[in-house]
Image: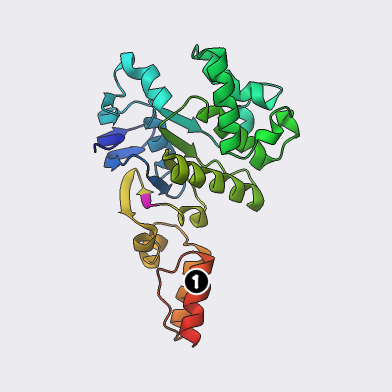
Amino acid sequence: MDPVIRIKNISYTYPDADRPALDGVTLDIEAGSFVAVLGSNGSGKSTLAKHLNAILLPQAGKVFVDGMDTIDEGSLLAIRRRVGMVFQNPDNQIVANVVEDDVAFAPENLGVEPREIRRRVDAALKQVDMYDFRLHAPHLLSGGQKQRVAIAGILAMDPAVLVLDEPTAMLDPRGRREVVAAVEKLCRERGITVVLITHHMDEAVRADRVLVMDRGRLAMDGTPREVFPRTDTLAALRLTVPDTTALIARLNAAGMAVPADALTPEECAAAIGRALR
């Protein structure tokens, strides 16, 4: 099966910038995968995200979505239907005074017939566990709930790929957990390809694949179990590691022998228990 997104040697420099935001990036994103993209400020991860549905176009190289070249204006609408974007601040994506009206906004503008809109709105809200709030005013919701409504609005467009550009940056820990759980559920249960741009390392633990950006280039690419134990490399890239990885590193430095690839809290607790026994 061909990758749902294929990126070939793309580069992009913002006006008046002293170096490229993207510098020869090549990668494929497989359909149905959950990919986390990490990097310090200015690493290029948000610029990469904006290339996935043609918000930005590469100045060199190519981006293909289901075989469609993003630089082809005739494919723009089809590409943006295939790849939905969710940004940091949900208030910037919520346009209506009632939750279900907001979720219906995009399919209405795409000319979807009313009965199908009703089906999509209900399905999207159920998929992010917000159906019971369908008649609520969005401004009365919590930050995590607003972000889930924003995600539902994208889901109502029936995308194949969901790109989230630091969607939890403005949320408290509970809101972050709600959003990441909803996103992972969409990937695992519905087969939606997820690209999560984040600076929270613990969010990337659940991903199938971790990409690490640095100064516009792809610095690391692997599974969470391959990437996170490389604590020295990540530190050189000005990145931390998940709390579990940091704890295991400290225990091993103190003389214990705990596997460095125990990433979730449950795995970490079990690994430490075995080491103590």
Residue at 52 percent across and 53 percent down: it is: 200
In the image, 12: left or right of 265?
left
Quarter of the image where one finds residue 170 = top right
Q: Is residue 133 above or below residue 35?
A: above
Numbered label tally: 1
Q: What percent of the width, then of the height, locates residue 15? A: 39, 27
Query: Split into 4 quadrants, where in the image is the N terminus?
Result: top left
Residue at image x 64%, y 42%?
144
* Residue found 34% across the figure and 32% down from its top: 13
Relative side of 22 to 120, left or right = left
**Quadrant in which residue 114 is drawn:** top right
In the image, residue 183 above or below residue 155: below
Please report the residue visible at 53 percent of the width from the left and 34 percent of the height from the top: 87
The residue type indicated by label 1 comes to Cys
Mark 1, other Cα within 10 Å: few <14 / some 14–19 / many ≥20? many
Q: Say if 50 sits above or below 183 in the image.
A: above
Is residue 26 shown in magenta?
Answer: no
Q: Main secondary structure of the magenta part?
A: strand
Residue 196 visible: no
Span highlighted in magenta in the image? 208-212
Residue 126: image location, x then y, percent: 60, 36
Residue that carries the numbered disc 1 in the rendered image: 268
The percent position of residue 196, horizontal first and vertical second, equals: 46, 43
118 vs 177, nearest the viewer: 118
| Picture coordinates of residue 146, whole percent (x, y) | 65, 35
Q: Secondary structure at mark 1?
A: helix
The answer to whether any part of residue 195 appears in the image is: yes
